[in-house]
Image (tube, helix red, strand yellow):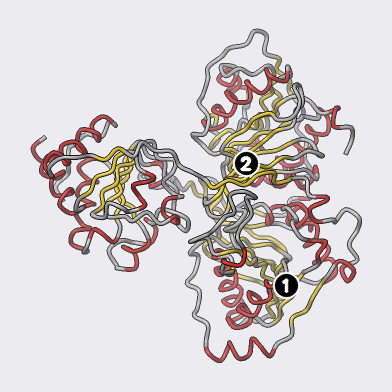
Amino acid sequence: MDNLKDYKDIWVFTEIKDHEEVNNCALEILGKAREIADELNQELVAIVLAYEAEKYLSIITEYGVDKIIYISHLDLKHYHEQFFTNLIYELIEKYKPSIFLFPSTEASNALSARLAYRCRTGLVNSVLNLELGGEKGDDLLLTDKPAYGGNVSVKIICPKTRPQMCTITTGIFKKKELKKENVEIIEENYHSDKSKIKIKIIGAPTRKDKPTALLSDAKFVIGGGQGIGSKENFEKLYILADYTNGQVGGTRRPILNGWMPEHLQIGISGESIKPNLYLALGISGAIQHVVGITDSDTIIAINTDPNASIFKTSDYCVIGDAKEIVDGLLKLLEKD
Amino acid sequence: MLKIFVLIKQVPKTDNLQINLKTGALIRNKIDNIINPDDIFALEFALTIREKYGGVITAMTMGPSQAESSLREALAMGIDHVIHISDPIFSYSDTLQTTLVLKETFEKIKSYDVIITGSVTLDSGTGQVPYQLSEALQIPLITDIFIFEFEKDKFKCQRNFGHESQDIEVNLPVIIRIGKHFNKPRHIPLSGIKKAFEKKIEIMDFNLLNCPDEIDGCNKSPTQVIKTDKLVHKRKNEFIKGSIKEKIQRIFDIMKEHGIEKRWMQKK
């Protein structure tokens, strides 16, 4: 590694999602990265690799960047492990950023892991918080991330190598609109060696749009646990979801009981959700479930046991029978 | 005959995990260690390939001496051979250091066709090793496959990639990362348990692997953990009081406050 002092500026990989728009999480990260850049008196740089990359640049300039470095080429329409890794690795070698932040998406998780290996540097994934540590003006980044299945938060530093790299999940930071004067735009050249492509795509790929109602994207999630009592009662959660445009999910128990299909499991071996509201019905609150719901804006829990641990992780706690409450809510919705 | 390798990790079972809040360390003697749950799908996938195409499966893990029990479990499932990569120097390796050790291991093994991994480990949860190993060995990594076949020295499959479904083809060797619930892992047969204890575990340590200076566990890991805290999720914890009717009404109001309204419903 060269002298650490040679590395400066904060980079954000502003991923272009489905060759259609700038990834929202990347814009969120720019807000936090701006604060860090100001504290260090360094530049905030957005990195864009896309087909017709120019069309995304004006949006990115709305979020506080000092500079954009971009590469535009048809080969960059989709994430490609070799093209993206090679090109960005060259940019890192040329410009030497101190900090490089990525949205936590399928493509960026892959890309950042590959780049970290090539740079022989550290990568912290799914970061919950970022701040500068050490002396004033020191670029050492302190990052918090969950570990052991969400039971603990660990603070990680990467003191001896650069760039310091992180991936950040959606919703951790808030987007901040800020237009800087004279944003510098740099276009770098595209080049690739196609003879070295390892994965051959046979035939035209089919676009597979994700199902419209993804549990992880739902705004309202109705979660059921053992306390729902029966398959018949569990069916009522689907009716409630139908009325409210919500999504049903649950713990491991209803799957084992045959009340709910496996893909609707929320928690450590299932989906993580981040709805505006999560209604936890008859759920005791085992940690395996709770780790999947912590990003919910508001949680209402209903349980007959006043000591149920789900209450500790809820905003509103209701002692009562989940079934009775579902019936009551359905009645109110019918009248509404 | 396919030479199949499966990477597994032993991790602490995370329910009832106890943490020393002063030091942030796990209270180890109270923990059950298990094969990382995602890795079980990788083991099952290897067994499926062997059944269909023939081959020899080697499971390997990197970890302290107690990780041996996870290798025995893999043998009991029907895996042919196991390798235990273990040396005090390797302890507290981060993902980069782990990848570098695995690179040395595969360079020593020399001949491999398929390397199978799970998605994410339960303890550190980085999911980075498959990608980094792909860089280190300069061989492709394929994720999220759903239909596959081996044809001579090629692996063909359909995979989900971004918002596309692709038909792809790669030359072996290849790394395949298996998703959660890709298959239904088999139960361990009783006969397997006996066999598991008859087989020899191959140990690979620092000297045997002839590791370069670049490898030095926690000393040369770029990332360092400086603090561990119990993760607390701050919530309002307001108990809603009153009759059942009042409770239901209050929940209904909170739903409305969150923009959840009745929508026009289609008759089913």
**Residue B110, x across and y down, in percent:** 83, 70
Q: Residue at x 45, y 56 (%)?
A: A288
Q: Residue at x 44, y 55 (%)?
A: A287
Vertical relation: B246 (above or below) B186: above
Kindly give the residue lying farthest to the top in the view shown: A181
Does B227 sit left or right of B89 as displayed? left
Residue A219: where, in percent of width, then height? 34, 38
Q: Nearer the viewer, residue A218 or B172?
A: A218
Which residue is label 2 attached to? A108
Q: Nearer the viewer, residue A226 or B6?
A: A226
Quarter of the image where one finds residue B9: bottom right
Query: Residue shown at 77%/28% (left/top)?
Result: A189
Distance between the alpha carbons at the discs numbered 2 and 1: 35 Å
Amino acid bearing label 1? Ser
Given residues A245 and A259, the one toward you in this image is A259
Check disc 2 and give the amino acid type. Ser
Residue A200 quadrant: bottom right
Q: Disc number at residue B65?
A: 1
Q: Badge 2, how many Cα within 10 Å: few under 14, some, many 20+? A: many
* Horizontal and vertical percent position of residue B240: 23, 39
